[in-house]
Image: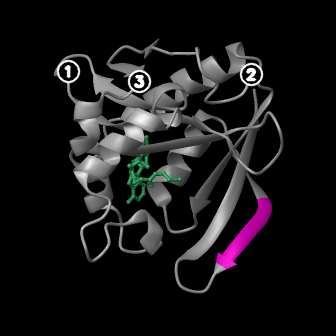
Amino acid sequence: MAVGAPGNEVVLETSRLLLRPWRIAEAVVQRELWTERDPRVPPHRRIDADGHPTVAELEDSIRTHEVWTTGLLAVERKASRDVVGYCGLVNSGHAAGEPELAFELLRRVWRQGYATEASLAVLEWARSSGYERLWATVWDWNTASRRVLAKVGFTETDRKEVHAVHGTTLFATMRL
Ligand SMILES: CC(C)(COP(=O)(O)OP(=O)(O)OC[C@H]1O[C@@H](n2cnc3c(N)ncnc32)[C@H](O)[C@@H]1OP(=O)(O)O)[C@@H](O)C(=O)NCCC(=O)NCCS
């Protein structure tokens, strides 16, 4: 099954979270994630000098990009019913049928185990969808993300891509 294939709308439930398709009105949350990104993250993933992407542009992206429905799911806290980030799978350039796990949460909810909890649900979803192997890429300086990947079962490989300004990208993988 291809990540992002139409007709695969997904809802995953954990003890504290629901992972489900993004709603257009939640583009404001995506904008907040953009504004909070670490200054070491490359410019194309940060708000530019003219304020792009705007909320309207992110709304358009939710409307038109299947990834926000069947790939990178909105992470909603069940108790407070607020969306605090995303977690899910994206097609990667690694190998056909071996997508990448990705997650990003608002700073105010960090260090409460949400990324780990959401990732475990996504791994189960990937397993039941028939995937045999997943990848993840992470900046070497991103201790929290590396820790989450290790906790859910990823192993860092020898593959690295060194970038002069932003740091080194590490490649991690896991068999399901
Ligand atoms: C990565 C991210 C999603 C983690 O979310 P989270 O909900 O805080 O993660 P969890 O609480 O499940 O686990 C975080 C782990 O990292 C550890 N950690 C967090 N910050 C840390 C730091 N600065 N130094 C060392 N360890 C750290 C926590 O202690 C925890 O490990 P533990 O359970 O062994 O104590 C969040 O930091 C984030 O959104 N970062 C920005 C986006 C990003 O980096 N995405 C991933 C790209 S590869």
Q: In the displayed structure, does residue 114 sit left or right of residue 78?
A: right
Q: Residue at x 47, y 27 (%)?
A: 69
Mark 3 Cα shell of 10 Å, populated few (<14), some (14-19), many (≥20): many
Q: Residue at x 49, y 51 (%)?
A: 145
Q: Amino acid at mark 3?
A: Pro
Q: Is residue 160 magenta?
A: yes
Which residue lies under the disc numbered 1? Answer: 81
How many dots with numbers? 3
Q: Residue at x 31, y 66 (%)?
A: 47
Q: Which residues are magenta?
A: 158-162
Which residue lies under the disc numbered 3? Answer: 21
Does label 3 or label 1 sit earlier along the sequence? 3
Are circles 3 and 2 on residues that touch, CB within 8 Å?
A: no
Answer yes or no: disc 1 within 8 Å of ligand 1.
Answer: no
Does label 3 or label 2 sit earlier along the sequence? 2
Helix, strand or loop for disc 1:
loop
**Residue 110 appears in the figure:** no
Q: In the displayed structure, does residue 125 sit left or right of residue 38?
A: right
Q: Which image quarter is the N terminus in?
A: top right
Residue 84: quadrant of the picture: top left
Q: Which image quarter is the C terminus in?
A: top right
Q: In the displayed structure, does residue 130 sit left or right of residue 62?
A: right
